[in-house]
Image: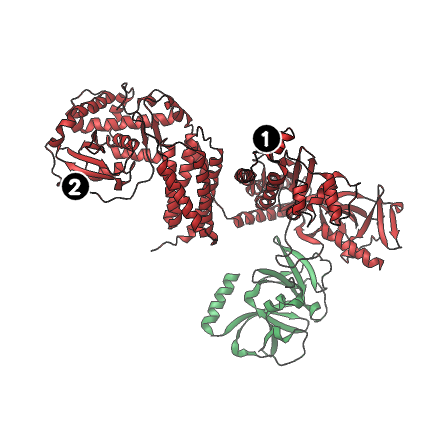
Chain colours: A red, B green
Amino acid sequence: MTIDMSQFYEVFFDESDELLAVAERLLLDVNIENPDSEDLNAIFRAAHSIKGGAATFGFMDMTEITHVLENLLDRIRKNEMKLTAEHVDAFLTAKDVLKMMVDGHRLATDVNLEQVADVKMMLKSLSENGDVTPKTTSAVVAIKPELEPEPEIVILSDNNTPIADGLKRFNISFINCSEKDLTNLQSELELLGSVILGQATDKKPYLLLDTESDQDDILSICSFVLEPEDLVITLLDPTLEATIVAPAKTQVAQSLVSNSVVTEPVADSIKDEKPKTEKVKVEEEVGYGLFAEEGEENVEEGYGFFAPFKPHPDAQVLQLIGDDNASAALEDKKAEDAKVVTETITPTTMQPAAKRESPTSNASSETTSIRVGIEKVDQLINLVGELVITQAMIEQRISTLDPAHHEPLINSVGQLTRNTRDLQEAVMSIRMMPMDFVFSRFPRMVRDLAAKLNKKVEFVTNGATTELDKGLIERIVDPLTHLVRNSVDHGIETPEQRKKSGKNETGRLTLSAAHKGGSIVIEVTDDGAGLNRSKLLAKAKSSGLNVGESMTDTEVYQLIFAPGFSTAEVVTDVSGRGVGMDVVKRNIAAMGGVVEIRSVLGYGTTVSIALPLTLAILDGMSVSLGRSLYVIPLGLIVETMQPTMNDIKTVTGKGLMVSVRGEYLPIIPLYALFNQDTEIMHPTEGVLVILEAEGKKAALFVDGLVGQQQVVIKSLETNFKKVNGVSGATIMGDGSVALIIDVPAIIKMGQLNTEGAMQ
Amino acid sequence: MSAIAEQSNQESNTTGANSNEYLTFVLGEESYGIEILKVQEIRGYDAVTKIANTPSFIKGVVNLRGLIVPIVDLRIKFHLGKVEYNELTVVIILNLGGRVVGMVVDGVSDVMNLQSNQIRTVPEIVSSIDTKYITGLATVDEKMFILVDIEQLMNSQEMELIDAI
């Protein structure tokens, strides 16, 4: 039976995207001088997970890149290499390339193979060049979670003749091995038997191992540290090596003995199974000790090979417990994905150890979320919406019942009401996502952009935890990207200019999000040059816009949103914002949001976007007209009024106007617009709702106000077509349908109507 | 419901090579038939919410368990019989490739299994329904049924139910 892997692709792509985003954030935060080992590990883990996934799904191109990346990262996190800015750049580029590949596999977009090759070369050369002379005194043990594939074994010697005392001696020589790996290997091989480090005539190091185990065991141990291809394991006749062995062996044995507080002859300790097991346990304990109670004495103990050692306090206890075999202990370690760093002499020992705070809590937070298709969530929200309506219907029906006779029923319905409301709230919160999802992509962009423009920009975010509907989150990205780019490009000046005007050379760009009333306000603030009112006005005049000196600042700043206003000339002259600002405004208006600009010449600019909290629910005012109800978005209502005869004016006897505090607004009779029958034909008998949208105001004439309520927006177009003047429909408490008025369209329709009437 | 329809469809497939089940209904004096697989449900006529500036045969929209569904009255559209709404007035809810539309009829009669040899072609006549939407005429027990391709009809421009492309 074959499994269709493609069904899991999507999961892998999502996961890769997330991991890449995490890696990028960490890379941007990393302190190059003194990198946090936990961060490095996290980056390594991300690369490793992608590599694993890519290999599973057969995306070999991604596997290759991640492999080189992983190698380099591995060396850095093991302190074999110093992290440099060059590395960070290389990693970031690699991240981009990986992203490109993910997209390539997922959306069949183009993958720039040249770039891929470049990155691979760059990473390779970095990992080869950056060797740091290894410290002979340090011992680093790294246990990688993965097992390399079983290699072919090169056997140079004769067959497996057992030696008299049941031990076999192996010569392990290395084709390509750093000293650090060697020490790692040595400590690992200790698990099997006694190990002696020696140097061959050609200066190449080798290890002699006396053990009962066979080649396969050695190999699997070695594969934690080295690629199996890099080592040659040879079975030796022990007598040949006697001269070298003797002194070294004693030393090893001593350390062994002292560690386990068992005073036994050397030969016995090697021969006997039990002390070996103890030793494993001791090591394991040291490992876990580091992990859990960092900063304790046993950190410095290492494995007691090269340093003066103290008897391990736990050893005796362990001796009593210890019955596990070596491989089980190893499994444990692997499972923990633990990396144990000990430096026995270097004074900085404590630092990496102290940094490893709660790595497990990090790991667990990653697994507390589940992936659910968005359509399922939407369905859930819809169903709950239905439930709320049904519940409202029940409530309405029982309101006519006599409370004295139906008290239990009324109480139960009250309970139902509360439960439904809680349920609705909980379900709505599923769609909410923290703004961090949007904000997190900007540090990189700002960094790259600033570097390209030779500017210094400090990027600050506030309120990244503010939650917003997922639908809005996705749609806000583009406009925000635009605004941020504009701020860096045109808002913030070059360091020289800033110095000249007495500002800090480093500009500051702030992205913030906050809840204000029923909406969320997102602001992009820079401390750059600000908008120049007079230049804007001059530009507007020259491009034939109807402007005058009497305009308020806000109105003038809104000019930059005018389509076509953004020419290159303006951008350079006014230091500001232009390209595609009309698109920004249109996008935000489409989300039901409003853009506002505040600026002080010489001190900076703030672009403020106010968005409704969710797209699915609308705060509305229901109004009556004849026998039907209509819903008007509350955000677009300025005020409502009942005019007197004196307020109503006519133009040429037809077009009706209303004077509101000296301002004349056209009256749009909804009954005429929608051809509806109503008995209320004159504005003085009904209500005027003053609306404002897209900078235009009008007074909508309806029969009366019914009430303010939150409504769930339903599309008319699902089963019907777009209706002019109606943006959607909603279901009222009694189950009937009410139409939601499309305010901008109504205002436009009203204008046409009055024009028609005047002709 | 669709499961039953599917089952019966399977049965009919085994009994006759080219037989289909039709839901028959009355519009004025005439009987019509539509493929039963296009029918989602049948309900009574409820109050509708009128939509401005739409032709008179589009009665408006109703709330069908959270779905906003437009209701058309074929009697108005095709000038068939008296248009009145009483307890017997029925709305057939159609599911046409995911789009849900309701149509008002005077009454639902029956579900019939029609063999292809029972269906006659439509002569060139003048009718208010364009003959291209009529797939055939069937006679059962001396009664004539007009078989309508309801999906094509509802999706046609003249019904004004969808945006002009």
Q: CA distance from mark 1 to mark 2?
A: 67 Å
What x and y, as percent, mark residue A436? 55, 38
Q: Is residue B24 above or below residue A559?
A: below
Q: Is residue A296 left or right of residue B4?
A: left
Q: Is residue A140 above or below residue A581?
A: above
Marker disc for residue A505: 1
Residue at screen point 62% across, 30% down:
A499
Viewport quadrant of the C terminus of chain A: bottom right
Looking at the picture, tell me which residue is in the foreground, A538 or A392: A538
Viewport quadrant of the N terminus of chain A: bottom left
Q: Is residue B140 visible?
A: no
What x and y, as percent, mark residue B69? 64, 58
Q: Chain of mark 1?
A: A
Q: Chain of mark 2?
A: A
Q: Disc 1 vs disc 2: which is toward the camera?
A: 1
Looking at the picture, tell me which residue is in the foreground, A526 or A431: A526
Looking at the picture, tell me which residue is in the foreground, A512 or A510: A510
Please state which amino acid type lies under the numbered disc 2: Leu
Farthest residue toward the left? A164
What x and y, as percent, mark residue A288? 34, 27
**Secondary structure category for the residue under label 2:** loop
Please state which amino acid type lies under the numbered disc 1: Glu
**Secondary structure category for the residue under label 1:** loop
Mark 1 nearby-residue class (10 Å; few <14, some 14–19, many ≥20): some
What x and y, as percent, mark residue A3? 37, 54
Circle 2 residue: A156
